[in-house]
Amino acid sequence: MIEGLEIKKLKVNYDERGHLMEILRRDDKIFKKFGQVYITTVKKDIIKAWHYHKLQDDYFCCIYGKILLAVYDARKNSKTFGKLSKWVLSLENPKLIKIPALVYHGFKGLSEEEAIVINIPTKPYNRKNPDEYRVNPFDKNINFNWKI
């Protein structure tokens, strides 16, 4: 697994009224600090990648539909430099993935319905000076096949 990356298995509790799933608590071992919470969506076969942050960690959880989440460690001083990891995330396979700063990440919509992803970054978005750096999803330096 990529150095600094953490996974929290989530549990969905169902009853006759619907379901409930805790995603992140401040007393979780995986929790670092709170910046903000936002929702993003992705349509089937659309890729939102690659990007990374210099200052913040991200916490991704897919709450509707299904995505392929991929991460690539480009940190030259990391024990896992050059490694790739991927997961299929959905409500049927609920996980919270903590992606550390400087690790490239992105996702692809897999479900027919538009997938909904919650992100809980450790810093609020800075509109004047965003901590977001983008790389082409098919960058030759990242040997990743988005087909599943």
Image: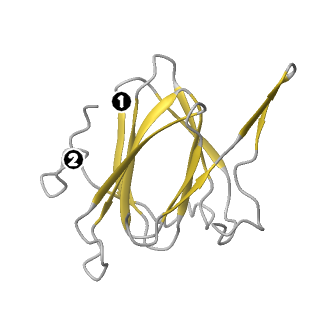
**What amino acid does circle 1 point to?**
Ile
Which residue is most to the right?
A: 17
Give the quarter of the image for residue 13. top right
Exactly how many numbered labels are in the figure?
2
In the rendered image, residue 145, in percent from the top left (x then y), is placed at 21, 40
Q: Residues within 10 Å of mark 2 (few under 14, many from 20)?
A: some
Q: Earlier in the sequence, mark 2 or mark 1?
A: 1
Q: Relative to 62, say whether 25 is above or below.
A: below
**What amino acid does circle 2 point to?**
Phe
In the rendered image, residue 40, in percent from the top left (x then y), is placed at 55, 39
Q: Is disc 1 placed on a helix, strand or loop? A: loop
Q: Nearer the viewer, residue 44 or 70?
A: 70
Q: Residues within 10 Å of mark 1 (few under 14, many from 20)?
A: few
Q: Relative to 79, say whether 145 is above or below.
A: above
Q: Nearer the viewer, residue 28 or 65?
A: 28
Q: Is disc 2 placed on a helix, strand or loop? A: loop
Give the quarter of the image for residue 137. top left
Residue appearing at x 70%, y 42% in the figure: 11
Q: Which color mode does the image show?
A: secondary structure
Q: Quadrant of the N terminus?
A: bottom left
Residue appearing at x 34%, y 54% in the figure: 85
Residue appearing at x 43%, y 66% in the figure: 53
Q: Is residue 124 left or right of residue 22?
A: left
* Residue where numbered disc 2 is placed: 144
In the rendered image, residue 54, in percent from the top left (x then y), is placed at 43, 72
Determine the CA span between mark 2 and mark 1. 15 Å
Q: Quadrant of the C terminus?
A: top left
Q: Nearer the viewer, residue 7 or 49?
A: 7
In the rendered image, residue 75, in percent from the top left (x then y), is placed at 30, 74
* Residue where numbered disc 1 is placed: 46
Residue appearing at x 36%, y 48% in the figure: 86
Q: Is residue 10 left or right of residue 72?
A: right
